[in-house]
Structure formats: structure tokens, C-alpha cells
Image: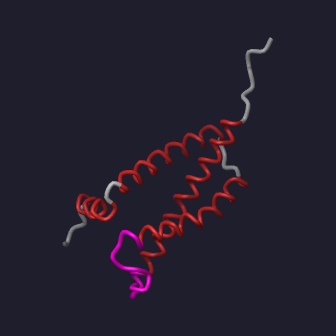
Amino acid sequence: MKDLNPLVLLSVFEEMLGPLLWLLLAVVILGIIAFASLLLREKHLVSRRLVRSEALGIVGGALSLVLMAKVSSSGFTDAGGPADWLLIALVFGAGLVGSTILIYTMAGWWTALRKPTLNMNTK
């Protein structure tokens, strides 16, 4: 395999994850759309919400490692070389960043939807 073909990667991920692949892709796409619309609505990042989301993102990184161990045929004790540990670090980082964004977005929309709106048509 000399070339990196995206369809081959898609087939490998679909074989490993099954229907969970499509659920994860839907969560990623909807999460990005919700995050972008929240940023457009608020026009800035809320630092307190971001710090709390980053702290909870560590749990998301750990859960991504658990998912990786479940879908692969090897465990963490089989990691032998630097490339294996780099892949483990990348999976943890992707889980951390993704869950931080999702938690920040959910907390932002939760706050926005619970806040009473001002009636601009008062006389």
C-alpha cells in the first residue's frame, strides 16, 4: 500500500467501529455546527465555561482510549514503539479536544435556552 486512499481508511474504520462510526461522525458534524452558531451568537468565549469544559474533557480523552482499546485487537500493554505511544497520545488528544468542544457547546446552549429573553416590543 503505497498510496493513502481515503476510501480505504473509511473501510477500515467502518470495519472496526461498525454503525458507531456514523454516529460519531454525526456527533462531530452537529457539534461543530452548534459550536460555530454559539460563537456567532455570543461573539466571544466564556472563560469560566471553557475551563470547566477542559477539566471534563480529560474524562472524554480517557473514554476515547477505552473505545480505542475495545475496537482494536491489542491493548495498552502491546504498545512497543514510539509510533504506538504517539498514536495513543493522539487518540487521547482528539478525545480531549472533541469532548471539550461538545461540553462547552452543550453548556452554552443550556445557559442560552434557560435565560429569559427580553421583550423588545414593550410600550
User: In percent of the image, x 45 and y 51: which residue is there?
Assistant: 28
* Residue 3 located left or right of residue 43: left
Reply yes or no: does residue 61 show up in magenta. Answer: no
Instruction: Determine whether 49 is above or below 81 in the image.
Output: above
Instruction: Determine whether 28 is above or below 17 in the image.
Output: above
Residue closest to the eye, 66 or 84: 66
Q: Tell me the quarter of the picture where residue 109 sits.
A: top right
Reply yes or no: does residue 81 show up in magenta. Answer: yes
Quadrant the C terminus occupies: top right
User: In percent of the image, x 33 and y 76: which residue is there?
Assistant: 73
- Colour scheme used in the picture? secondary structure
Quadrant the N terminus occupies: bottom left
Q: Position of residue 68 (x, y in %)?
A: 41, 70
* Residue 31 located left or right of residue 122: left
Q: Tell me the quarter of the picture where residue 12 sits.
A: bottom left
* Residue 40 located left or right of residue 91: right
Q: Position of residue 34 (x, y in %)?
A: 53, 43
Instruction: Determine whether 57 is above or below 65 in the image.
Output: above
Residue located farthest toward the bottom when viewing the structure as drawn: 80
| Magenta stretch in the rendered image | 69-84
Count of marks overlaid on the render: 0
Residue located farthest toward the top when viewing the structure as drawn: 123
